[in-house]
Every structure is written in C-alpha cells, then in structure tokens.
C-alpha cells in the first residue's frame, strides 16, 4: 500500500490560527470559530482542509521548522535566525513551532511526526560537514535536547528526526564531502535517535548515478547509505528522494518531475538503496514562466492555475509601485484551456500566447545543398541545432571566378565537383589533383624508369586569365581537404604559396575532413592584366577546385536557419451573461509582439578541430581505423613510392619515413537500439592507442567518452596526448584511470620508460561510461572526468617535454575498451554558443550576445587563450533551457514567415513563441493524473511511498486516490 509523506510549509500563522482555536492548557484546545479557516489565504485554507478531511490518509509528516546555522545552533525556521529554539541555557524551549502545528500533533496521534532539521546553502552546510569549531557537537546536542522536550510535550507523537541539508554544488572529491555527510548522519543516529528510540530519515537530492550529477556528489547515495550505526544496522531508516524541481524557476518551462528523469533516478535508487525504505518525491505545486522577458519562474498552486484558466488573472509588471501595489498590464482577462502533457501527465497552459511552434513544425533550410541544421532528441525532448558552424563565404568586389582549369600536364586526376549555389549562384567548380610522377621498376636493369605518357611526369594544373585592371587583390581558392594533412603548392605570377602548409592557417582551422569543400583565403597577391596560377603536386588527396580574385573576403561562419509560418489571430474573452449564457467578446489585440525562443545556450567552448563519433566509418566499410589516413598505424620505417630502385622490394621507392601514432586493432561499430556508435579495442594482451595522424602545436583540449569492460579489473585507459614521435608507441603524456592500482595517473612516457607526474584516488566504476578530459595551457595540465578535476599539474612542476606539441587520442591496456567520442580542440580560441537571430520582413535582429573584452578572429572565434574566457566577467550562461526574448516588433494579424538563424553553433532551440509584449507566459502544473503517475512509478520500483512537497498547494483530488492509513 502506498504511503503519503509531506511537510509543514503552508500552515496558518499564529495570528490567523487564534481566530480558529486557542490552547487553554497543555494539549487541550478550545475551538473558537470552526469556520475561521475558510477565510484564510488559499494555501492555508487548503492545508487545513486537507487535515480536516484527509488526515487518515497522511502516513508521515515532517515538521519543517528547525533551521540549522553554520555553527550548528538551531533556530525557529519560520520566525527567523533571531529566534533560537532553545533557551540560553538550553534547558527549555524558547520558541515552539506554530500553534496550528501543535494543534495538529495533539489531535492526530496516528500520523508519524518527525522533527526536520533544515540547513540550506554552501555557507551553512559546508562548515557543518567540515565540523568547523565543533559545529556538529552543537548541532547534535541541541537536536537531542529539542527532541527530548518535544517528546515530553507530545508524548507518543514524535517518531523521528529528519535531516534536510541542501546545497547546489559540491567541492572536489578530495574534500570527501559524501563521506563526511555519511559520518554526520551516523552520529545523529547513534547520539540522538537510538538513545531516544527515534528513526532517522534523510532527504537526498535526485541523482542518476554514482556521484552524478557532479554538483550533488556530496550526497552520493552509495556512500551515504554505507553508514552503520552502533548496532551494526544501516544508520538511515528512511530515504526521501527530492525528485522534483528538475524544471525550476531558473530553467526553461517543464514539469517538475519529468518521467524519463524519474525513471533514471529510480533505476539508480534500485541499484544502491533498499527501495522499501525510499519515499519518491513529487511536487504539489507548479510554476509559471514569463516569455516576454527573462524573469525567474514563479510558483503557481493548483488553485491559482484554475483561476488563470478561467480568465480571472492577467500579467503584471513583476514589481510593485511605490504604494506597494501590483502594476497590471494593459491586457484583457482571457480564459485558456490547459493541455495534458503525455510524457509527464502534467497540465501546461499558454497564457496570452498568440502562436507557438514545437520542433516538428519548423522547416529546416539547407545551405549550398548541404544540411547545416538538424533535428535531434535528448531525453525524450526534440530540439533543433547546428552542431558546428558552416562557411557562408562573402566576396566583395569580385574580379574573376575560375571554376575550371585552363590546362593540365603530367600526372593529374579529375576529382569532385561543387556547386555552391547559395554562395556563388550559377557556378560549378571542378576539382583536380596533381600527383608525383610514377616510376616503374626494371628488374633486369635494377633501375627506375618514368611511366609512359603524362603519368611519368609530375602533375601541373594551370589557370590562365585576364583582368581588366592590374592591382593587389585577394586570392581565394576553392579546395577539398579529405584528410588531416593537405598540401597544395601554388605559384601566382611567380609568387609562391602553399595551401594547407603549417603556419598558413591556424591550428584550429575548422575545414579539415568535414566540411571538406570550402573557400580558402590565400592572402593578397599582385595581379596584372594577364595572369597564370600554377598548381603543383598535391598531398594527402587534397584537390583544387578553382579560384576567386576579389577585393575582400569573409568566411561568414554561421549556424543554420529554420523557417516558421506564423499566424496571429485575436483571442476571445467573456462578455455579458444573458439568460445564463455567457457571450463571447473579442479581446484587445496587442500593439506589439515579442518573439521568444526556448533556447539552451552554453558557455564558450574550446574551438573544435576534430570530433569523431565513429559511426560513419562503418558505413564506409572500414574494419580497422588504424588502416585509415585519419588514424595511421605506427610504422617506424615506411617506404613510400619514389624514383629509387630497391631490388629487395622489387619496386621504386622514396626516402623512408616514420609515420603514424596508432597501435592495435580499433574496430568501429554502428549504433544500435541500446548503444551509441563507438570504436572497440581488445587491449587485454597488449597496450593499444588510437591517435589522430597529425601533430598540433597549440594548447590542447582533448575529450574522450570511454567505457572499460566491467570484468576487466586490470583496466588502464584514458587519453594519450602530445605524442611527438611519429612511428613510435609509448611516447608522450597520458592521463589514465588505473583500476589495478586504484589511482588516476598523469604520466610521461618515452623510450620505454614511464614517469608518474601526479596521481589521485580512483573514483570510477568499471563498466560505466565516463568523459575523460585533458586541458593544457602553457605549462599547466588539468585532468578531469566529466566536470570534476581529478589532477591539477601546474606550471610550478617539472615537465619532461613541452605539453603543447604532438598528436592526441586514446589509450588502453589490460582491458576491452569502447570509445564513443574523440574530440580535439584548442584552448587558444573559444567558440561562443549563445547568439541567435530572428529575420522578419527581411530585417535580421541578432540577439543574446554577451559582452566580453575580446575581439573575434576571421573564423568567428573569441581571441582568448586560457581555461575560461568568462572568468571574472560576471557572465552566467545557464547551460540549460531558458525562454529568451529575441526581438519585439509591431504586431500583425494573419500569416507571416519568420526565420530563426543560429548565429552560433551549439545553441539548441526547443520551442518558439509569439506573444503579447505586455506579458505572456507558460505554466506547468501537476494534478491528480501526474500524482497517479508518480505513484505508479513508486509502486513499480517497490518504494515505500510518495513524498509530496507540500500539502496546501495540491490538486485536492489526489486524496480520492490515496488509501486510508492502516
């Protein structure tokens, strides 16, 4: 049978309650006016009604009335810090809980009442955990004394102590906060609860895995539950999971408890806690979020949303005037229907919203026939985003467009074609590559002889053209870079330049591999009226597709666009009542409309150079990534083709070179229903590494999503970085998780030797997926798992080799490992992920750019080198969905096309709204249906009951579902 737990929050004040009853002697009450509660405020009225009519359905109730300060002293939580619960000598109660609560405890002895100790925020919780100035001793002493006095005043009523410590961040694991919290709870059990015969309940933040999310890792379930009391039993008798406020006042609208999230939480609960001891939290309240301006969402009770839906409320300015009065906006009172959300069973109500669009109603626009903006789904929610920017090249003063060669000689090949119709309408560019001469080996003579015809000569491509006027102009090449080390030498009227040569473009150049065809800025050259561009031997399969001569050029980096067909129509409101029938009257139509996006923006990220999710390799038929040019297998003595005879090899060869950084077999796998695409290696017999085939000279940021097999207890896996010797393994730095040793290590390896630079305790669970990160800036290395820093190796330490040059990838030994994502980025440039634009009537309105003291480079990156470009700037980007107004424009009636452009990549758009600029909003509220859903999940997972925060705000129909207490 499901049990209901709730708490005091909405009880009437003493001034209100004295209208209803008064205590004539200890525990004896005189009813003054039994109907007085009907005139109380909505929350208090509903709270009292729930107890009067449904007290027999309330199993347990926490008295949320005992605040805890940083020094451990306890105060009256409702009255404030100036009102200590105990007298100065701690011999008696100075301030009891409110009269109405004392009345309830006296009258309903069958409810399990508990004293809830409330300690909120880092400034109070952390000194308690650290036992600063023996704060824990004070807390335990006062808690025990308060419990004794309450048990004396309310005999056989008080059944437990409840600990409600909350903070929204965690210090690093080195602080051992979870262990400290566990030990504090054990002290409470041993020193308060057991001596007094009380149970111990603890409130825990909702978590979905061990130490996940990281900001709540201080309440890690497995750690907290491991505490044992002096009798050898689990110290905690009941766990209350605060599985509400997933959507809060500072997030985008949504249900307080989405079911997909609740399921993740309960899956974790089932793995680490005894379900029969667990209450599952649900919210009795809802929230309303303003859409026309960025404003914190406000709590909306069930009785309040009914008034909104019946047209009794409208929007106000949010602030009161000098007389303390609400300033109401110039709007009509309009009734609205609520909608049932299938996923969460919550109600959602759109207030003064004139049009709205979910993801599926957007038209995604291509650019140059390429898909540049995508629909995706995350945790059951659809979104639209551009994962990376694309080039929208802008040419000024075009003098010549060369989209095909004039002539070609020697060993050349035709390649790809490209029609960039949105950039240069009407032009198709034709790709070519020039190659070295082919030599055939003559066995009889032991000589190398050029192949016959063009193949036996070094290839050359020629573009000859005239200009009406000589001058210095910018030369832009249309190129194709299919791999990581392209090189295309050109000669412009005797002026040499190498496209792709290191130093001719920044290390963070974003056009390697994908998108491969693009316009490359070669710089400014001197041109005459008659000109020739000669293209020499190309490397790494690079191709030249043509040239543009112009006065100026911009890359025009941008995300993609979506299009909406908006239709605005007047709303209707209630008119006069005639013969019991309400007439409809057209409501006032707003003068202005605000365009708002439900957007997830992120802080700037290190500029991404390479990111591999591995699935596309499977579609290409690749069985081992080390056999590709992306991840070449090590070869210390690779002999390329050339013109020198080699009788042993019976072929013509060039000078031997060392190449490649990868080792072992790394097989890609496509995504399935249960697992994302990944690359797999069995490194149980020998160490292996998958490292991209390019050395970088920069401050690197490397990420890898890794999972070692749960059965491989000798697993060592992580990131290999700054491998600076091609053709060798065991070379460079490594950040690894060593399960055999139970440590994280930062190592440097060279010439068969390994040097441990730093280490830390291992906190990972085999078989789980983790994001490993290495961040480098100057002589400073940060090693992280997720967002938790596990090793900080600063510039004051010794560095065996410069940590800013080499190739990067992943490493494994003693295990089977899967890598789901490999990303190489740089901390020398940052990509903002914040801006969007609305295009209305041909006018573009760019919005949401943060103010920073940095310029943008030619690729749209922030010119900043370091670990955090927003540090010290006071910029706070939520990294979560928010409703953010983009632009306010004059209103219209009827249809209009609006485009939304993702100015930056990485911005997610979930919903799009058009509404009254005076005020419009969306509300999400739980009701009977959502409560039943939460109860169904509670029973499915075998949990003890539902914990509802809190009585007085709920849909009263829930009591028709809850069984009576037995």
Image (cartoon, rainbow, N blue to C red):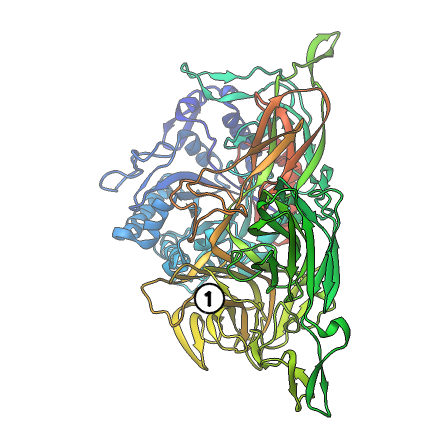
Q: In the depicted view, which residue is nearer to us: 251 or 199?
A: 251
Total numbered labels: 1
Classify 10 Å Cα crowding around label 1: few (below 14), some (14-19), many (20 and above). Answer: some
Relative vertical location of residue 96 with respect to residue 414 in this rendering, above or below: above
Residue extending furthest toward the top: 578
Q: Quadrant of residue 23?
A: top left
Q: In the depicted view, which residue is nearer to us: 549 or 483?
A: 549
Is residue 434 something one can see in this rendering?
A: yes
Q: Position of residue 301 (x, y in %)?
A: 56, 30
Quadrant of the drawing holding the C terminus: top right
Q: Is residue 445 left or right of residue 158?
A: right
Residue in the image at 45% along x and 59% along y? 699
Q: Position of residue 526 (x, y in %)?
A: 56, 50
Residue extending furthest toward the bottom: 444
Q: Secondary structure at mark 1?
A: strand
Q: Quadrant of residue 254?
A: top right
Q: Is residue 453 left or right of residue 161?
A: right
Q: Position of residue 661 (x, y in %)?
A: 55, 73
Q: Position of residue 670 (x, y in %)?
A: 71, 64
Is residue 253 something one can see in this rendering?
A: no
Q: Quadrant of residue 98?
A: top left
Q: In the depicted view, which residue is nearer to us: 886 or 378?
A: 886
Residue extending furthest toward the left: 89
Which residue is labeled 1 in the image? 805
Relative vertical location of residue 376 with respect to residue 820 in this rendering, above or below: above
Q: In the depicted view, which residue is nearer to us: 144 or 416?
A: 416
């Amino acid at each position: 049978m499901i049990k209901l737990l709730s708490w005091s929050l909405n009880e009437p004040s003493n001034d209100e309650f004295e209208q209803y009853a008064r205590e004539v002697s200890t525990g004896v009450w005189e009813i003054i006016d039994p109907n007085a509660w009907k005139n109380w405020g909505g929350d208090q009225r509903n709270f009292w009604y729930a107890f009067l009519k449904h007290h027999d359905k309330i199993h347990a109730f926490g008295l949320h009335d005992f605040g805890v300060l940083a020094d451990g002293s306890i105060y009256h939580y409702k009255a404030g810090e100036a009102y200590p619960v105990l007298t100065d000598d701690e011999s008696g109660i100075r301030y009891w809980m409110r009269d109405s609560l004392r009345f309830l405890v006296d009258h309903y002895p069958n409810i399990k009442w508990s004293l809830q100790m409330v300690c909120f925020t880092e400034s109070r919780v952390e000194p308690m955990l650290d036992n600063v100035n023996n704060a824990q001793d004070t807390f335990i002493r006062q808690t025990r004394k308060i419990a004794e006095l309450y048990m004396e005043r309310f005999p056989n009523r008080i059944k437990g102590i409840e600990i409600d410590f909350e903070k929204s961040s965690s210090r690093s694991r080195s602080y051992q906060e979870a262990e400290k919290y566990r030990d504090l709870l054990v002290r409470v059990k041993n020193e308060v609860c057991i001596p007094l015969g009380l149970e111990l309940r603890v409130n825990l933040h909702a978590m979905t895995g061990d130490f996940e999310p990281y900001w709540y890792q201080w309440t890690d379930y497995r750690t907290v539950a491991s505490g044992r009391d002096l009798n050898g039993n689990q110290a905690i008798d009941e766990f209350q999971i605060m599985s509400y406020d997933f959507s809060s006042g500072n997030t985008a609208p949504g249900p307080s408890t989405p079911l997909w999230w609740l399921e993740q939480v309960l899956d974790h609960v089932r793995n680490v806690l005894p379900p029969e001891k667990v209450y599952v939290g649900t919210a009795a309240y809802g929230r309303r979020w303003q859409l026309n301006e960025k404003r914190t969402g406000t709590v909306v009770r069930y009785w309040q949303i009914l008034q909104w839906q019946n047209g009794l409320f409208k929007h106000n300015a949010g602030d009161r005037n000098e007389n303390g009065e609400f300033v109401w906006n110039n709007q009509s009172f309009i009734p609205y229907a609520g909608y049932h959300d299938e996923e969460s069973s919550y109600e959602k109500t759109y207030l003064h919203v004139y049009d709205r669009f979910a993801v599926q109603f957007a038209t995604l626009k291509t650019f140059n026939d390429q898909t540049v903006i995508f629909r995706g789904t995350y945790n059951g929610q659809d979104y639209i985003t551009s994962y990376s920017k694309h080039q929208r090249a802008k040419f000024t003063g075009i003098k010549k467009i060369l989209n095909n060669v004039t002539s070609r000689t020697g060993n050349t090949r035709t390649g790809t074609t490209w029609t960039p119709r949105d950039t240069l309408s009407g032009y198709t560019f034709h790709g070519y590559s020039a190659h070295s001469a082919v030599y055939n080996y003559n066995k009889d003579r032991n000589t190398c002889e050029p192949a016959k015809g063009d193949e036996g000569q070094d290839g050359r491509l020629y573009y000859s053209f005239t200009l009406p006027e000589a001058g210095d102009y910018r030369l832009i090449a249309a190129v194709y870079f299919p791999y990581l080390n392209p090189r295309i030498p050109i000669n412009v009227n005797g002026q040499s330049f190498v496209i792709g040569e290191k130093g001719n473009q920044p290390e963070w150049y974003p056009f390697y591999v994908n998108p491969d065809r693009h316009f490359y800025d070669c710089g400014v050259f001197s041109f005459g009226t008659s000109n020739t561009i000669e293209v020499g031997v190309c490397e790494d399969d690079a191709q030249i597709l043509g040239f543009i001569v112009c006065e100026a050029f911009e890359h025009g980096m941008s995300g993609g666009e979506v299009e909406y067909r908006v239709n605005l129509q007047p709303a209707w409101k209630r008119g006069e009542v005639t013969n019991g029938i309400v007439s409809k009257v057209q409501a006032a139509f707003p003068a202005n409309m605000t365009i708002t996006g439900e957007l997830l923006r992120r802080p700037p990220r290190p500029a991404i150079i390479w990111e591999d999710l591995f699935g596309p390799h499977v579609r290409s038929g690749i069985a081992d990534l080390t056999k590709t040019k992306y991840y070449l297998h090590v070869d210390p003595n690779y002999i390329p083709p050339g013109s020198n005879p080699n009788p042993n090899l019976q072929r013509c060869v060039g000078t031997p070179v060392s190449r490649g950084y990868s080792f072992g077999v790394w097989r890609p796998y496509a995504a399935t229903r249960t697992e994302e695409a990944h690359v797999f290696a069995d490194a149980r017999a020998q160490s292996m590494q998958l490292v991209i085939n390019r050395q970088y000279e920069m401050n690197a940021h490397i990420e890898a999503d890794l999972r070692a097999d749960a059965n491989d207890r000798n697993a060592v896996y992580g990131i290999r970085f700054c491998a600076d010797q091609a053709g060798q393994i065991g070379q460079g730095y490594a950040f690894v998780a060593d399960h055999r040793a139970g440590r994280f290590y930062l190592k440097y390896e060279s010439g068969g030797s390994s040097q441990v630079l730093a280490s830390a305790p291992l906190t990972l669970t085999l078989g789980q997926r983790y994001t490993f990160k290495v961040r480098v800036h100057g002589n400073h290395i940060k090693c992280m798992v997720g967002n938790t820093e596990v090793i900080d190796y600063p510039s004051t330490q010794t560095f065996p080799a410069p940590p800013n040059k080499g190739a990067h990838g992943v490493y494994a030994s003693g295990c089977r490992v899967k890598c789901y994502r490999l990303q190489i980025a740089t901390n020398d440039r940052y990509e903002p992920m914040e801006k969007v634009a609305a295009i209305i009537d041909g006018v573009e309105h760019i919005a949401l750019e943060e103010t920073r003291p940095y310029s943008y480079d030619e690729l749209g990156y922030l010119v900043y080198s370091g670990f955090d470009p927003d540090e010290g700037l006071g910029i706070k980007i939520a990294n979560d969905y928010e409703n953010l107004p983009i632009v306010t424009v004059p209103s219209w009636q009827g249809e209009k096309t609006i485009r939304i452009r993702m100015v930056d990549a990485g911005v997610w758009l979930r919903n799009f709204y058009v509404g009254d600029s005076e005020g419009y909003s969306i509300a999400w509220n739980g009701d009977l249906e959502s409560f039943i859903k939460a109860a169904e999940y509670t029973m499915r997972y075998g949990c003890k009951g539902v914990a509802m925060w809190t009585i007085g705000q709920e849909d009263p129909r829930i009591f028709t579902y809850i069984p009576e207490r037995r």
